Structure formats: structure tokens, C-alpha cells
Amino acid sequence: MGIRSFLLSWSPSSRTQSKKPEAPTPLISAPVPQVAGPQIHTLQHGSYHLGTKTKGGVIPTILLDYHETKAEDLYKTANSFLSNDDVCTKDFLTGVVILQRRKSASPNWPHVDLVEYVSRQDKERFNWPLAYQIEIEAYGLPQGPYFLTPDNFLAEAWRLYPDTQDAFATTFAPTSATSRDKANEMSSLSSVRPLATIDDGGIWRSVAVPSRLYYTANSDKPLAGLRVTVKDNFKVAGVKTTQNNRAFVELYPPDQETAPYIEELRRLGAVVVGKTKMCAFASSEEATDQWIDFHAPFNPRADGYQSPSGSTTGGAVSLAAYDWLDLSVGTDTTGSIRWPAAWNGLYGMRLSWGAESLKGVFPSCREMDTLGLLCRDIDLLRKVISDSLPSRKECSVKPTRIWYPMDFFPHSNPRQQAMVDDFVETLEGILGVKRTLFSIADKWDQCPPEKAQGKSLREFIDKTAEYPFYYDGYNEFAQFREDYEKKFRKPVYVGPYMRWKWDHGATITESQRDDERNNLEDYRRWFEDTILSSGGPEGSSNAILILPCGSGEPKYRDTPNGPPGVVPAYSPNYIASMLRLPQIVIPIGQDPFHSRITQTTEQLPIVASIAGARGSDLLLIDLARAVLKHSGKPTKVETGRYIFCQASSYRPTSISQV
């Protein structure tokens, strides 16, 4: 629950309490957008006593480390909290402060009267009505904001943010946490409970995040304090998976396990704050008329009414909108990370197939499902992959070729095409090679595999994506349909897109699926032998493949979508999916357009995208980062309307050969 106002009365019991007011002192008079998190420590009785008439139940306060420290230094530290943390606000500068003696302190540690020092400071500047200081033994608790409870517990402070973009399916917070010696372990491995809170206006779901002051990254906890959202096809113990389908919610209880990759992120110190919305069953539903059971999240870019894409829809929207989040975890089957990254102007990484076990993740098509990550900061994206996926190896060996497939280029928007070509020109300078214009289809005709038997590439792979994708998409949920009908004596309802997808999948036999799997394996071997190979050191790629991603034209969420249809296997969407390649999406610019929503000029995010051989995930990130650095483009994107600080049009850049 939100904390609003409190009264405090004290009964001094030792020298560790400074002057006592003659009457109860009001501590907070304005609403506080925080909630008491897990109780992490019990203060010793005798150090202080909370009056039984306390109103509001808990008291906001801050904890400061104290070891032969001057009052002035403590004062400055407290002041720094306000600028370095979004949870610690002035509402925590109340009548009480907790001073924690460090372990190395002498038993005869000197007394510092912070109350007296604060009383002499400029009230106009800081306005801290401090009346009491509570001094405690060293417990290894991190400095920062806390809540005191009437039963002598110290609880973490978590801030409640409103989900104004409707990005989340469920939000949650830890149920409890045990006292720990290492602050980095606070809240990271505890069980969670769903939050049932809304904002003060009664409209938006609340998302709770802990103070960043609790966490310090180290070798054991390199991702300490990283705030993470998870796509709603990952299991999180104690939380329901919705699959964006009301029947699924109605049938199944909260999950009893957490996906191993999510547990690994937690083990490394990350804090998972909620599950984000996705297209039903990780499909390709488009906003808004194909989202039937739950409303589609709102893409914050440009006029606020552009498509958020899918299927990792909420994950992309949450990162594009909220600067208090750091990372979104999702899956990519046929573009579920890449297209939301493009439309929401984010760095998106489809990881090599098999980079991490997808145990605890509801499958869509096992042939193509893989882990995906979304981030606003390319350096953070690299760090997360390097720390959480040790199987991904660094490689300093440069690719010797840049493949530029004319099968899929140029873009229809010439300004978008110019931005992509500028990106490629910079990449040429970095690698010291010129792009090779070619056609994948022509390459096939020139040196087809024996099993092609005279078929063109289009003919050979015609069903190799369709049959596995739609067969699995239907049959993976056979048990769900059976369980639901048995319990409720009616069929599962799904929206028009999913109904079409399931109906199509039901027409494909297992033997048809298996035959096309074999053809798909032949296609993979041919592609690796002919175009992209990791035959060098681990993590290497002999070449880089430039692929189109994103649209250079606006797509309004209120525009009716056309009828669904099968996407051809011979398309840029399916290259990385069918061949199990890593692919990164890189924001490179903004393109102006006249919005019919705002009746003014808005900026559409423009991205470039490159793929490499299986296992070259980190190499792709390193090359993308090098291109951005050399061309003077940001390696971070902003939240909100624009991906870059200024809504400027694209200006070409170039570099000499490196």
C-alpha cells in the first residue's frame, strides 16, 4: 500500500537517541509514491521504541554508515541520495535517521550529533526536520531509504510507478527476505507476490522498484540492482502466466517454478519487477484490432499511436517509455524481439539458437524459438549477455566479408535506405572490406546442394518455415485446449488471428512437419558452407550479413489490419529464424513524418540490423558499437517521444578506412 502520513512518538532508552520533542512530531504531510518492501532486519529492542499510537504503521527513514565520520559528511551523503536514486526522495528525510556503525569501528566510537548539525543548516535548501538519530551495530545493511515498522523491523523501500503505457501483464514484489551479510543479495532471490495496487488516480497498474542504493556490482553480483522485466511466456513462481488469453488465465493457477534464465539473472543480482504483455501465445497479433482479450500496450515513440509490434510488445514499450527500467527479457521466433526493437527504437538482440535453455518458457516453435533481449544501452546489453550467458564467447578476429543481399534491399523509403547505407559504409571502414552485393537466390542457383534436385531456393524452402511454425503453434497448446474444454465444457476462445493460425496449423500433419525439418537442415548446412560460417575461433563469423528491419513509414494503431496470411520463408524475417543465427537491431536515426494524430512533424525510429554465424553474438554487438562510435552516433537511446535527445533528421557521416 502507498504510504501517506505518519506520527511518531518516542520513549528514550539509551544515549543513542538525541533530543525528544514535547509532542508527537509529524513526519510526512504529502503523499509518498513508495511501498514497504520485504522486512530484512530486526533492530535490537532497547535501541529505540516505537510508540503504540503510531499512525500509518511504518515510518520512512534513511540509514547511513557511520565510522569516525563527521556530521558534515553524513549530511552530504544523505543529500547525495536524492540525486542518485529515484526511490529516495525528500519524503524520507523525516524526524528519524539510523546510523549504522561499520564493522571496523572501535568499541569507543565517537558520538556524532547529526541532529544538532542538521538543525544549523539552511532549511530553505535541504529542509530536513531531523529530531532523532538511532545508532545501531554493524549489520552489513546498505545505506539508503527504509521503513521502520512498529514491531522493530527495518523494511526496504520500493517505489511505485504507474504503468501509463499499459505494458505489464502482472507486476510483483518480494514476499520476504532474510537478513544477509551482503547487501547485493537483498530481494534478489526471495519469492514474489503479485501486486494489486493502482496509482493514486485509480487508473494505472503500479510497478514496484527497489532503491538502487541497496546494490553495488561486484564479481559475484555483476548485475546488482538491474531492473528487469520478463515476457509473459516465462514462468515465475507464484505468478500466473496469462499468454495474453483470458481462457488460459481462467484455467491455470500460478506457476510453481521459475525459468532457469530468470533465476540466473536474479542470482547475478538483477531484480525482476514484472511480466510484460505479449501477443497471444507469442504470435504476431498487431495492435489494435487483433488484440482481443487484453489491450495492446502503447508505443511512446513519435505521436504515441504507432504500432508497438510484437510479440515482445510490452517488454519493448516498457523500456522505450520508462527510464526506471533497464532491461527486458523475451523470446524471438520469427521477429518477436527484432520488430518491437525497431518500432520502439531500442537495441534488440535475437541470440543464437540454443544460447540458453528455454526450460520454463512456453514454446511457440521449438525449431526457431530462442532467447532475446531488449535494452536502451548497447554497452549494458553486452554486459548482460557476457555475464549471464558464459557460453557466448568474445572474438577479436574480424569478419572478412560483408554480405549485402539485394533480395531484400533497397528500402522503399529513400531516407531510411540512406541511413542504412551510411551504417554499412562505416562498417566497411572498420572491417577494411567493401560490401558484396549479391542475391541469396542467385547464389543457390549457382551452387545448389545435391538435394535441391533442380528446385530454386524459393521452391525448396517454400514450406520449411511454414510447416514447423504452424504445426508447433497449434499442437504445443493441444493439452491446454483439452484441459479447458474438459473443465468448462466449452472450447477455448482466441482472437481472429490466433483462430486462423490454429486452424491452419491443424491442417499440417506431423510427417509433413518432419519432412520440412529435414529440408530445413539441408538449407542450414548449405547456408553455412556458402555464406556464413563460424569455422574460425569460437565466437567468430567469417562474414556479416546486412538485413533490413523496421519500416520507414508510419503504422497507426487505429488502422484496421488486413486478414492474416502465411509469411513466405524467402523473406528477411525468416533468415535468422530458420538458420538459427544471432541478429542485432541498432537504432541509427530518426525520420520525420507528418502525423495525422498530432497534426505536426514527428520522428520515426530508424534502425540497422546485422546477423552473423551462430555463436557470434558478442562480435555483432562489438561491431555495432564500433560503427556507432566511429560515426558519432549515440550508444544509448532516450525514453519517450524521441530516441535521441534532439529530434533531428538524419545527416550522413563517413569515415576513412580504419
Image: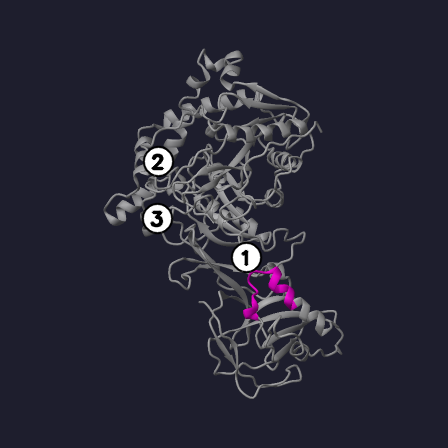
The answer to whether residue 65 is left or right of residue 90 is right
Q: Secondary structure at mark 3?
A: loop
Q: Which residue is mark 1?
A: 189
Q: Amino acid at mark 1?
A: Leu
> Is any part of residue 351 visible from this angle?
no
Q: Identify the colour scheme used.
A: one colour
Residue 285 position within the rendered picture, expressed as x and y whole percent measured from the top left: 37, 39
Q: Give the magenta part as a residue range.
A: 78-92
Question: From the image, which quarter does the N terminus lie in?
Answer: bottom left
Which circle marks residue 294 in the picture? 3
**Kind of residue at badge 2:** Tyr
Tag 3: Cα neighbours inside 10 Å, few (<14), some, or many (≥20)?
some
Mark 2, Cα crowd under 10 Å, few <14 / some 14-19 / many 20+, is: many
Q: Tag 2 or tag 3, which sits nearer the N-term?
A: 3
Residue 44 is situated, as x and y percent measured from the top left of the image, at 60, 77
- Residue in the picture at 64% in, 26% down: 428
Q: Give the side of residue 276 with respect to residue 530, left or right.
A: left
Dot 3 or dot 1, earlier in sequence: 1
Residue at 39% in and 43% down: 597
Q: Is residue 71 left or right of residue 593?
A: right
Give the label on residue 573, or none.
none
The answer to whether residue 254 is left or right of residue 626 is: left
Q: Earlier in the sequence, mark 1 or mark 2?
A: 1
Tell me how far mark 3 sits from mark 2, CA to CA. 21 Å
Q: What residue is disc 2 on?
A: 474
Front position in the image: 651 or 386: 651
x and y percent of residue 19 in the render?
63, 85
The secondary element bearing badge 1 is classed as loop
Give the percent coordinates (x, y) of residue 458.
43, 19
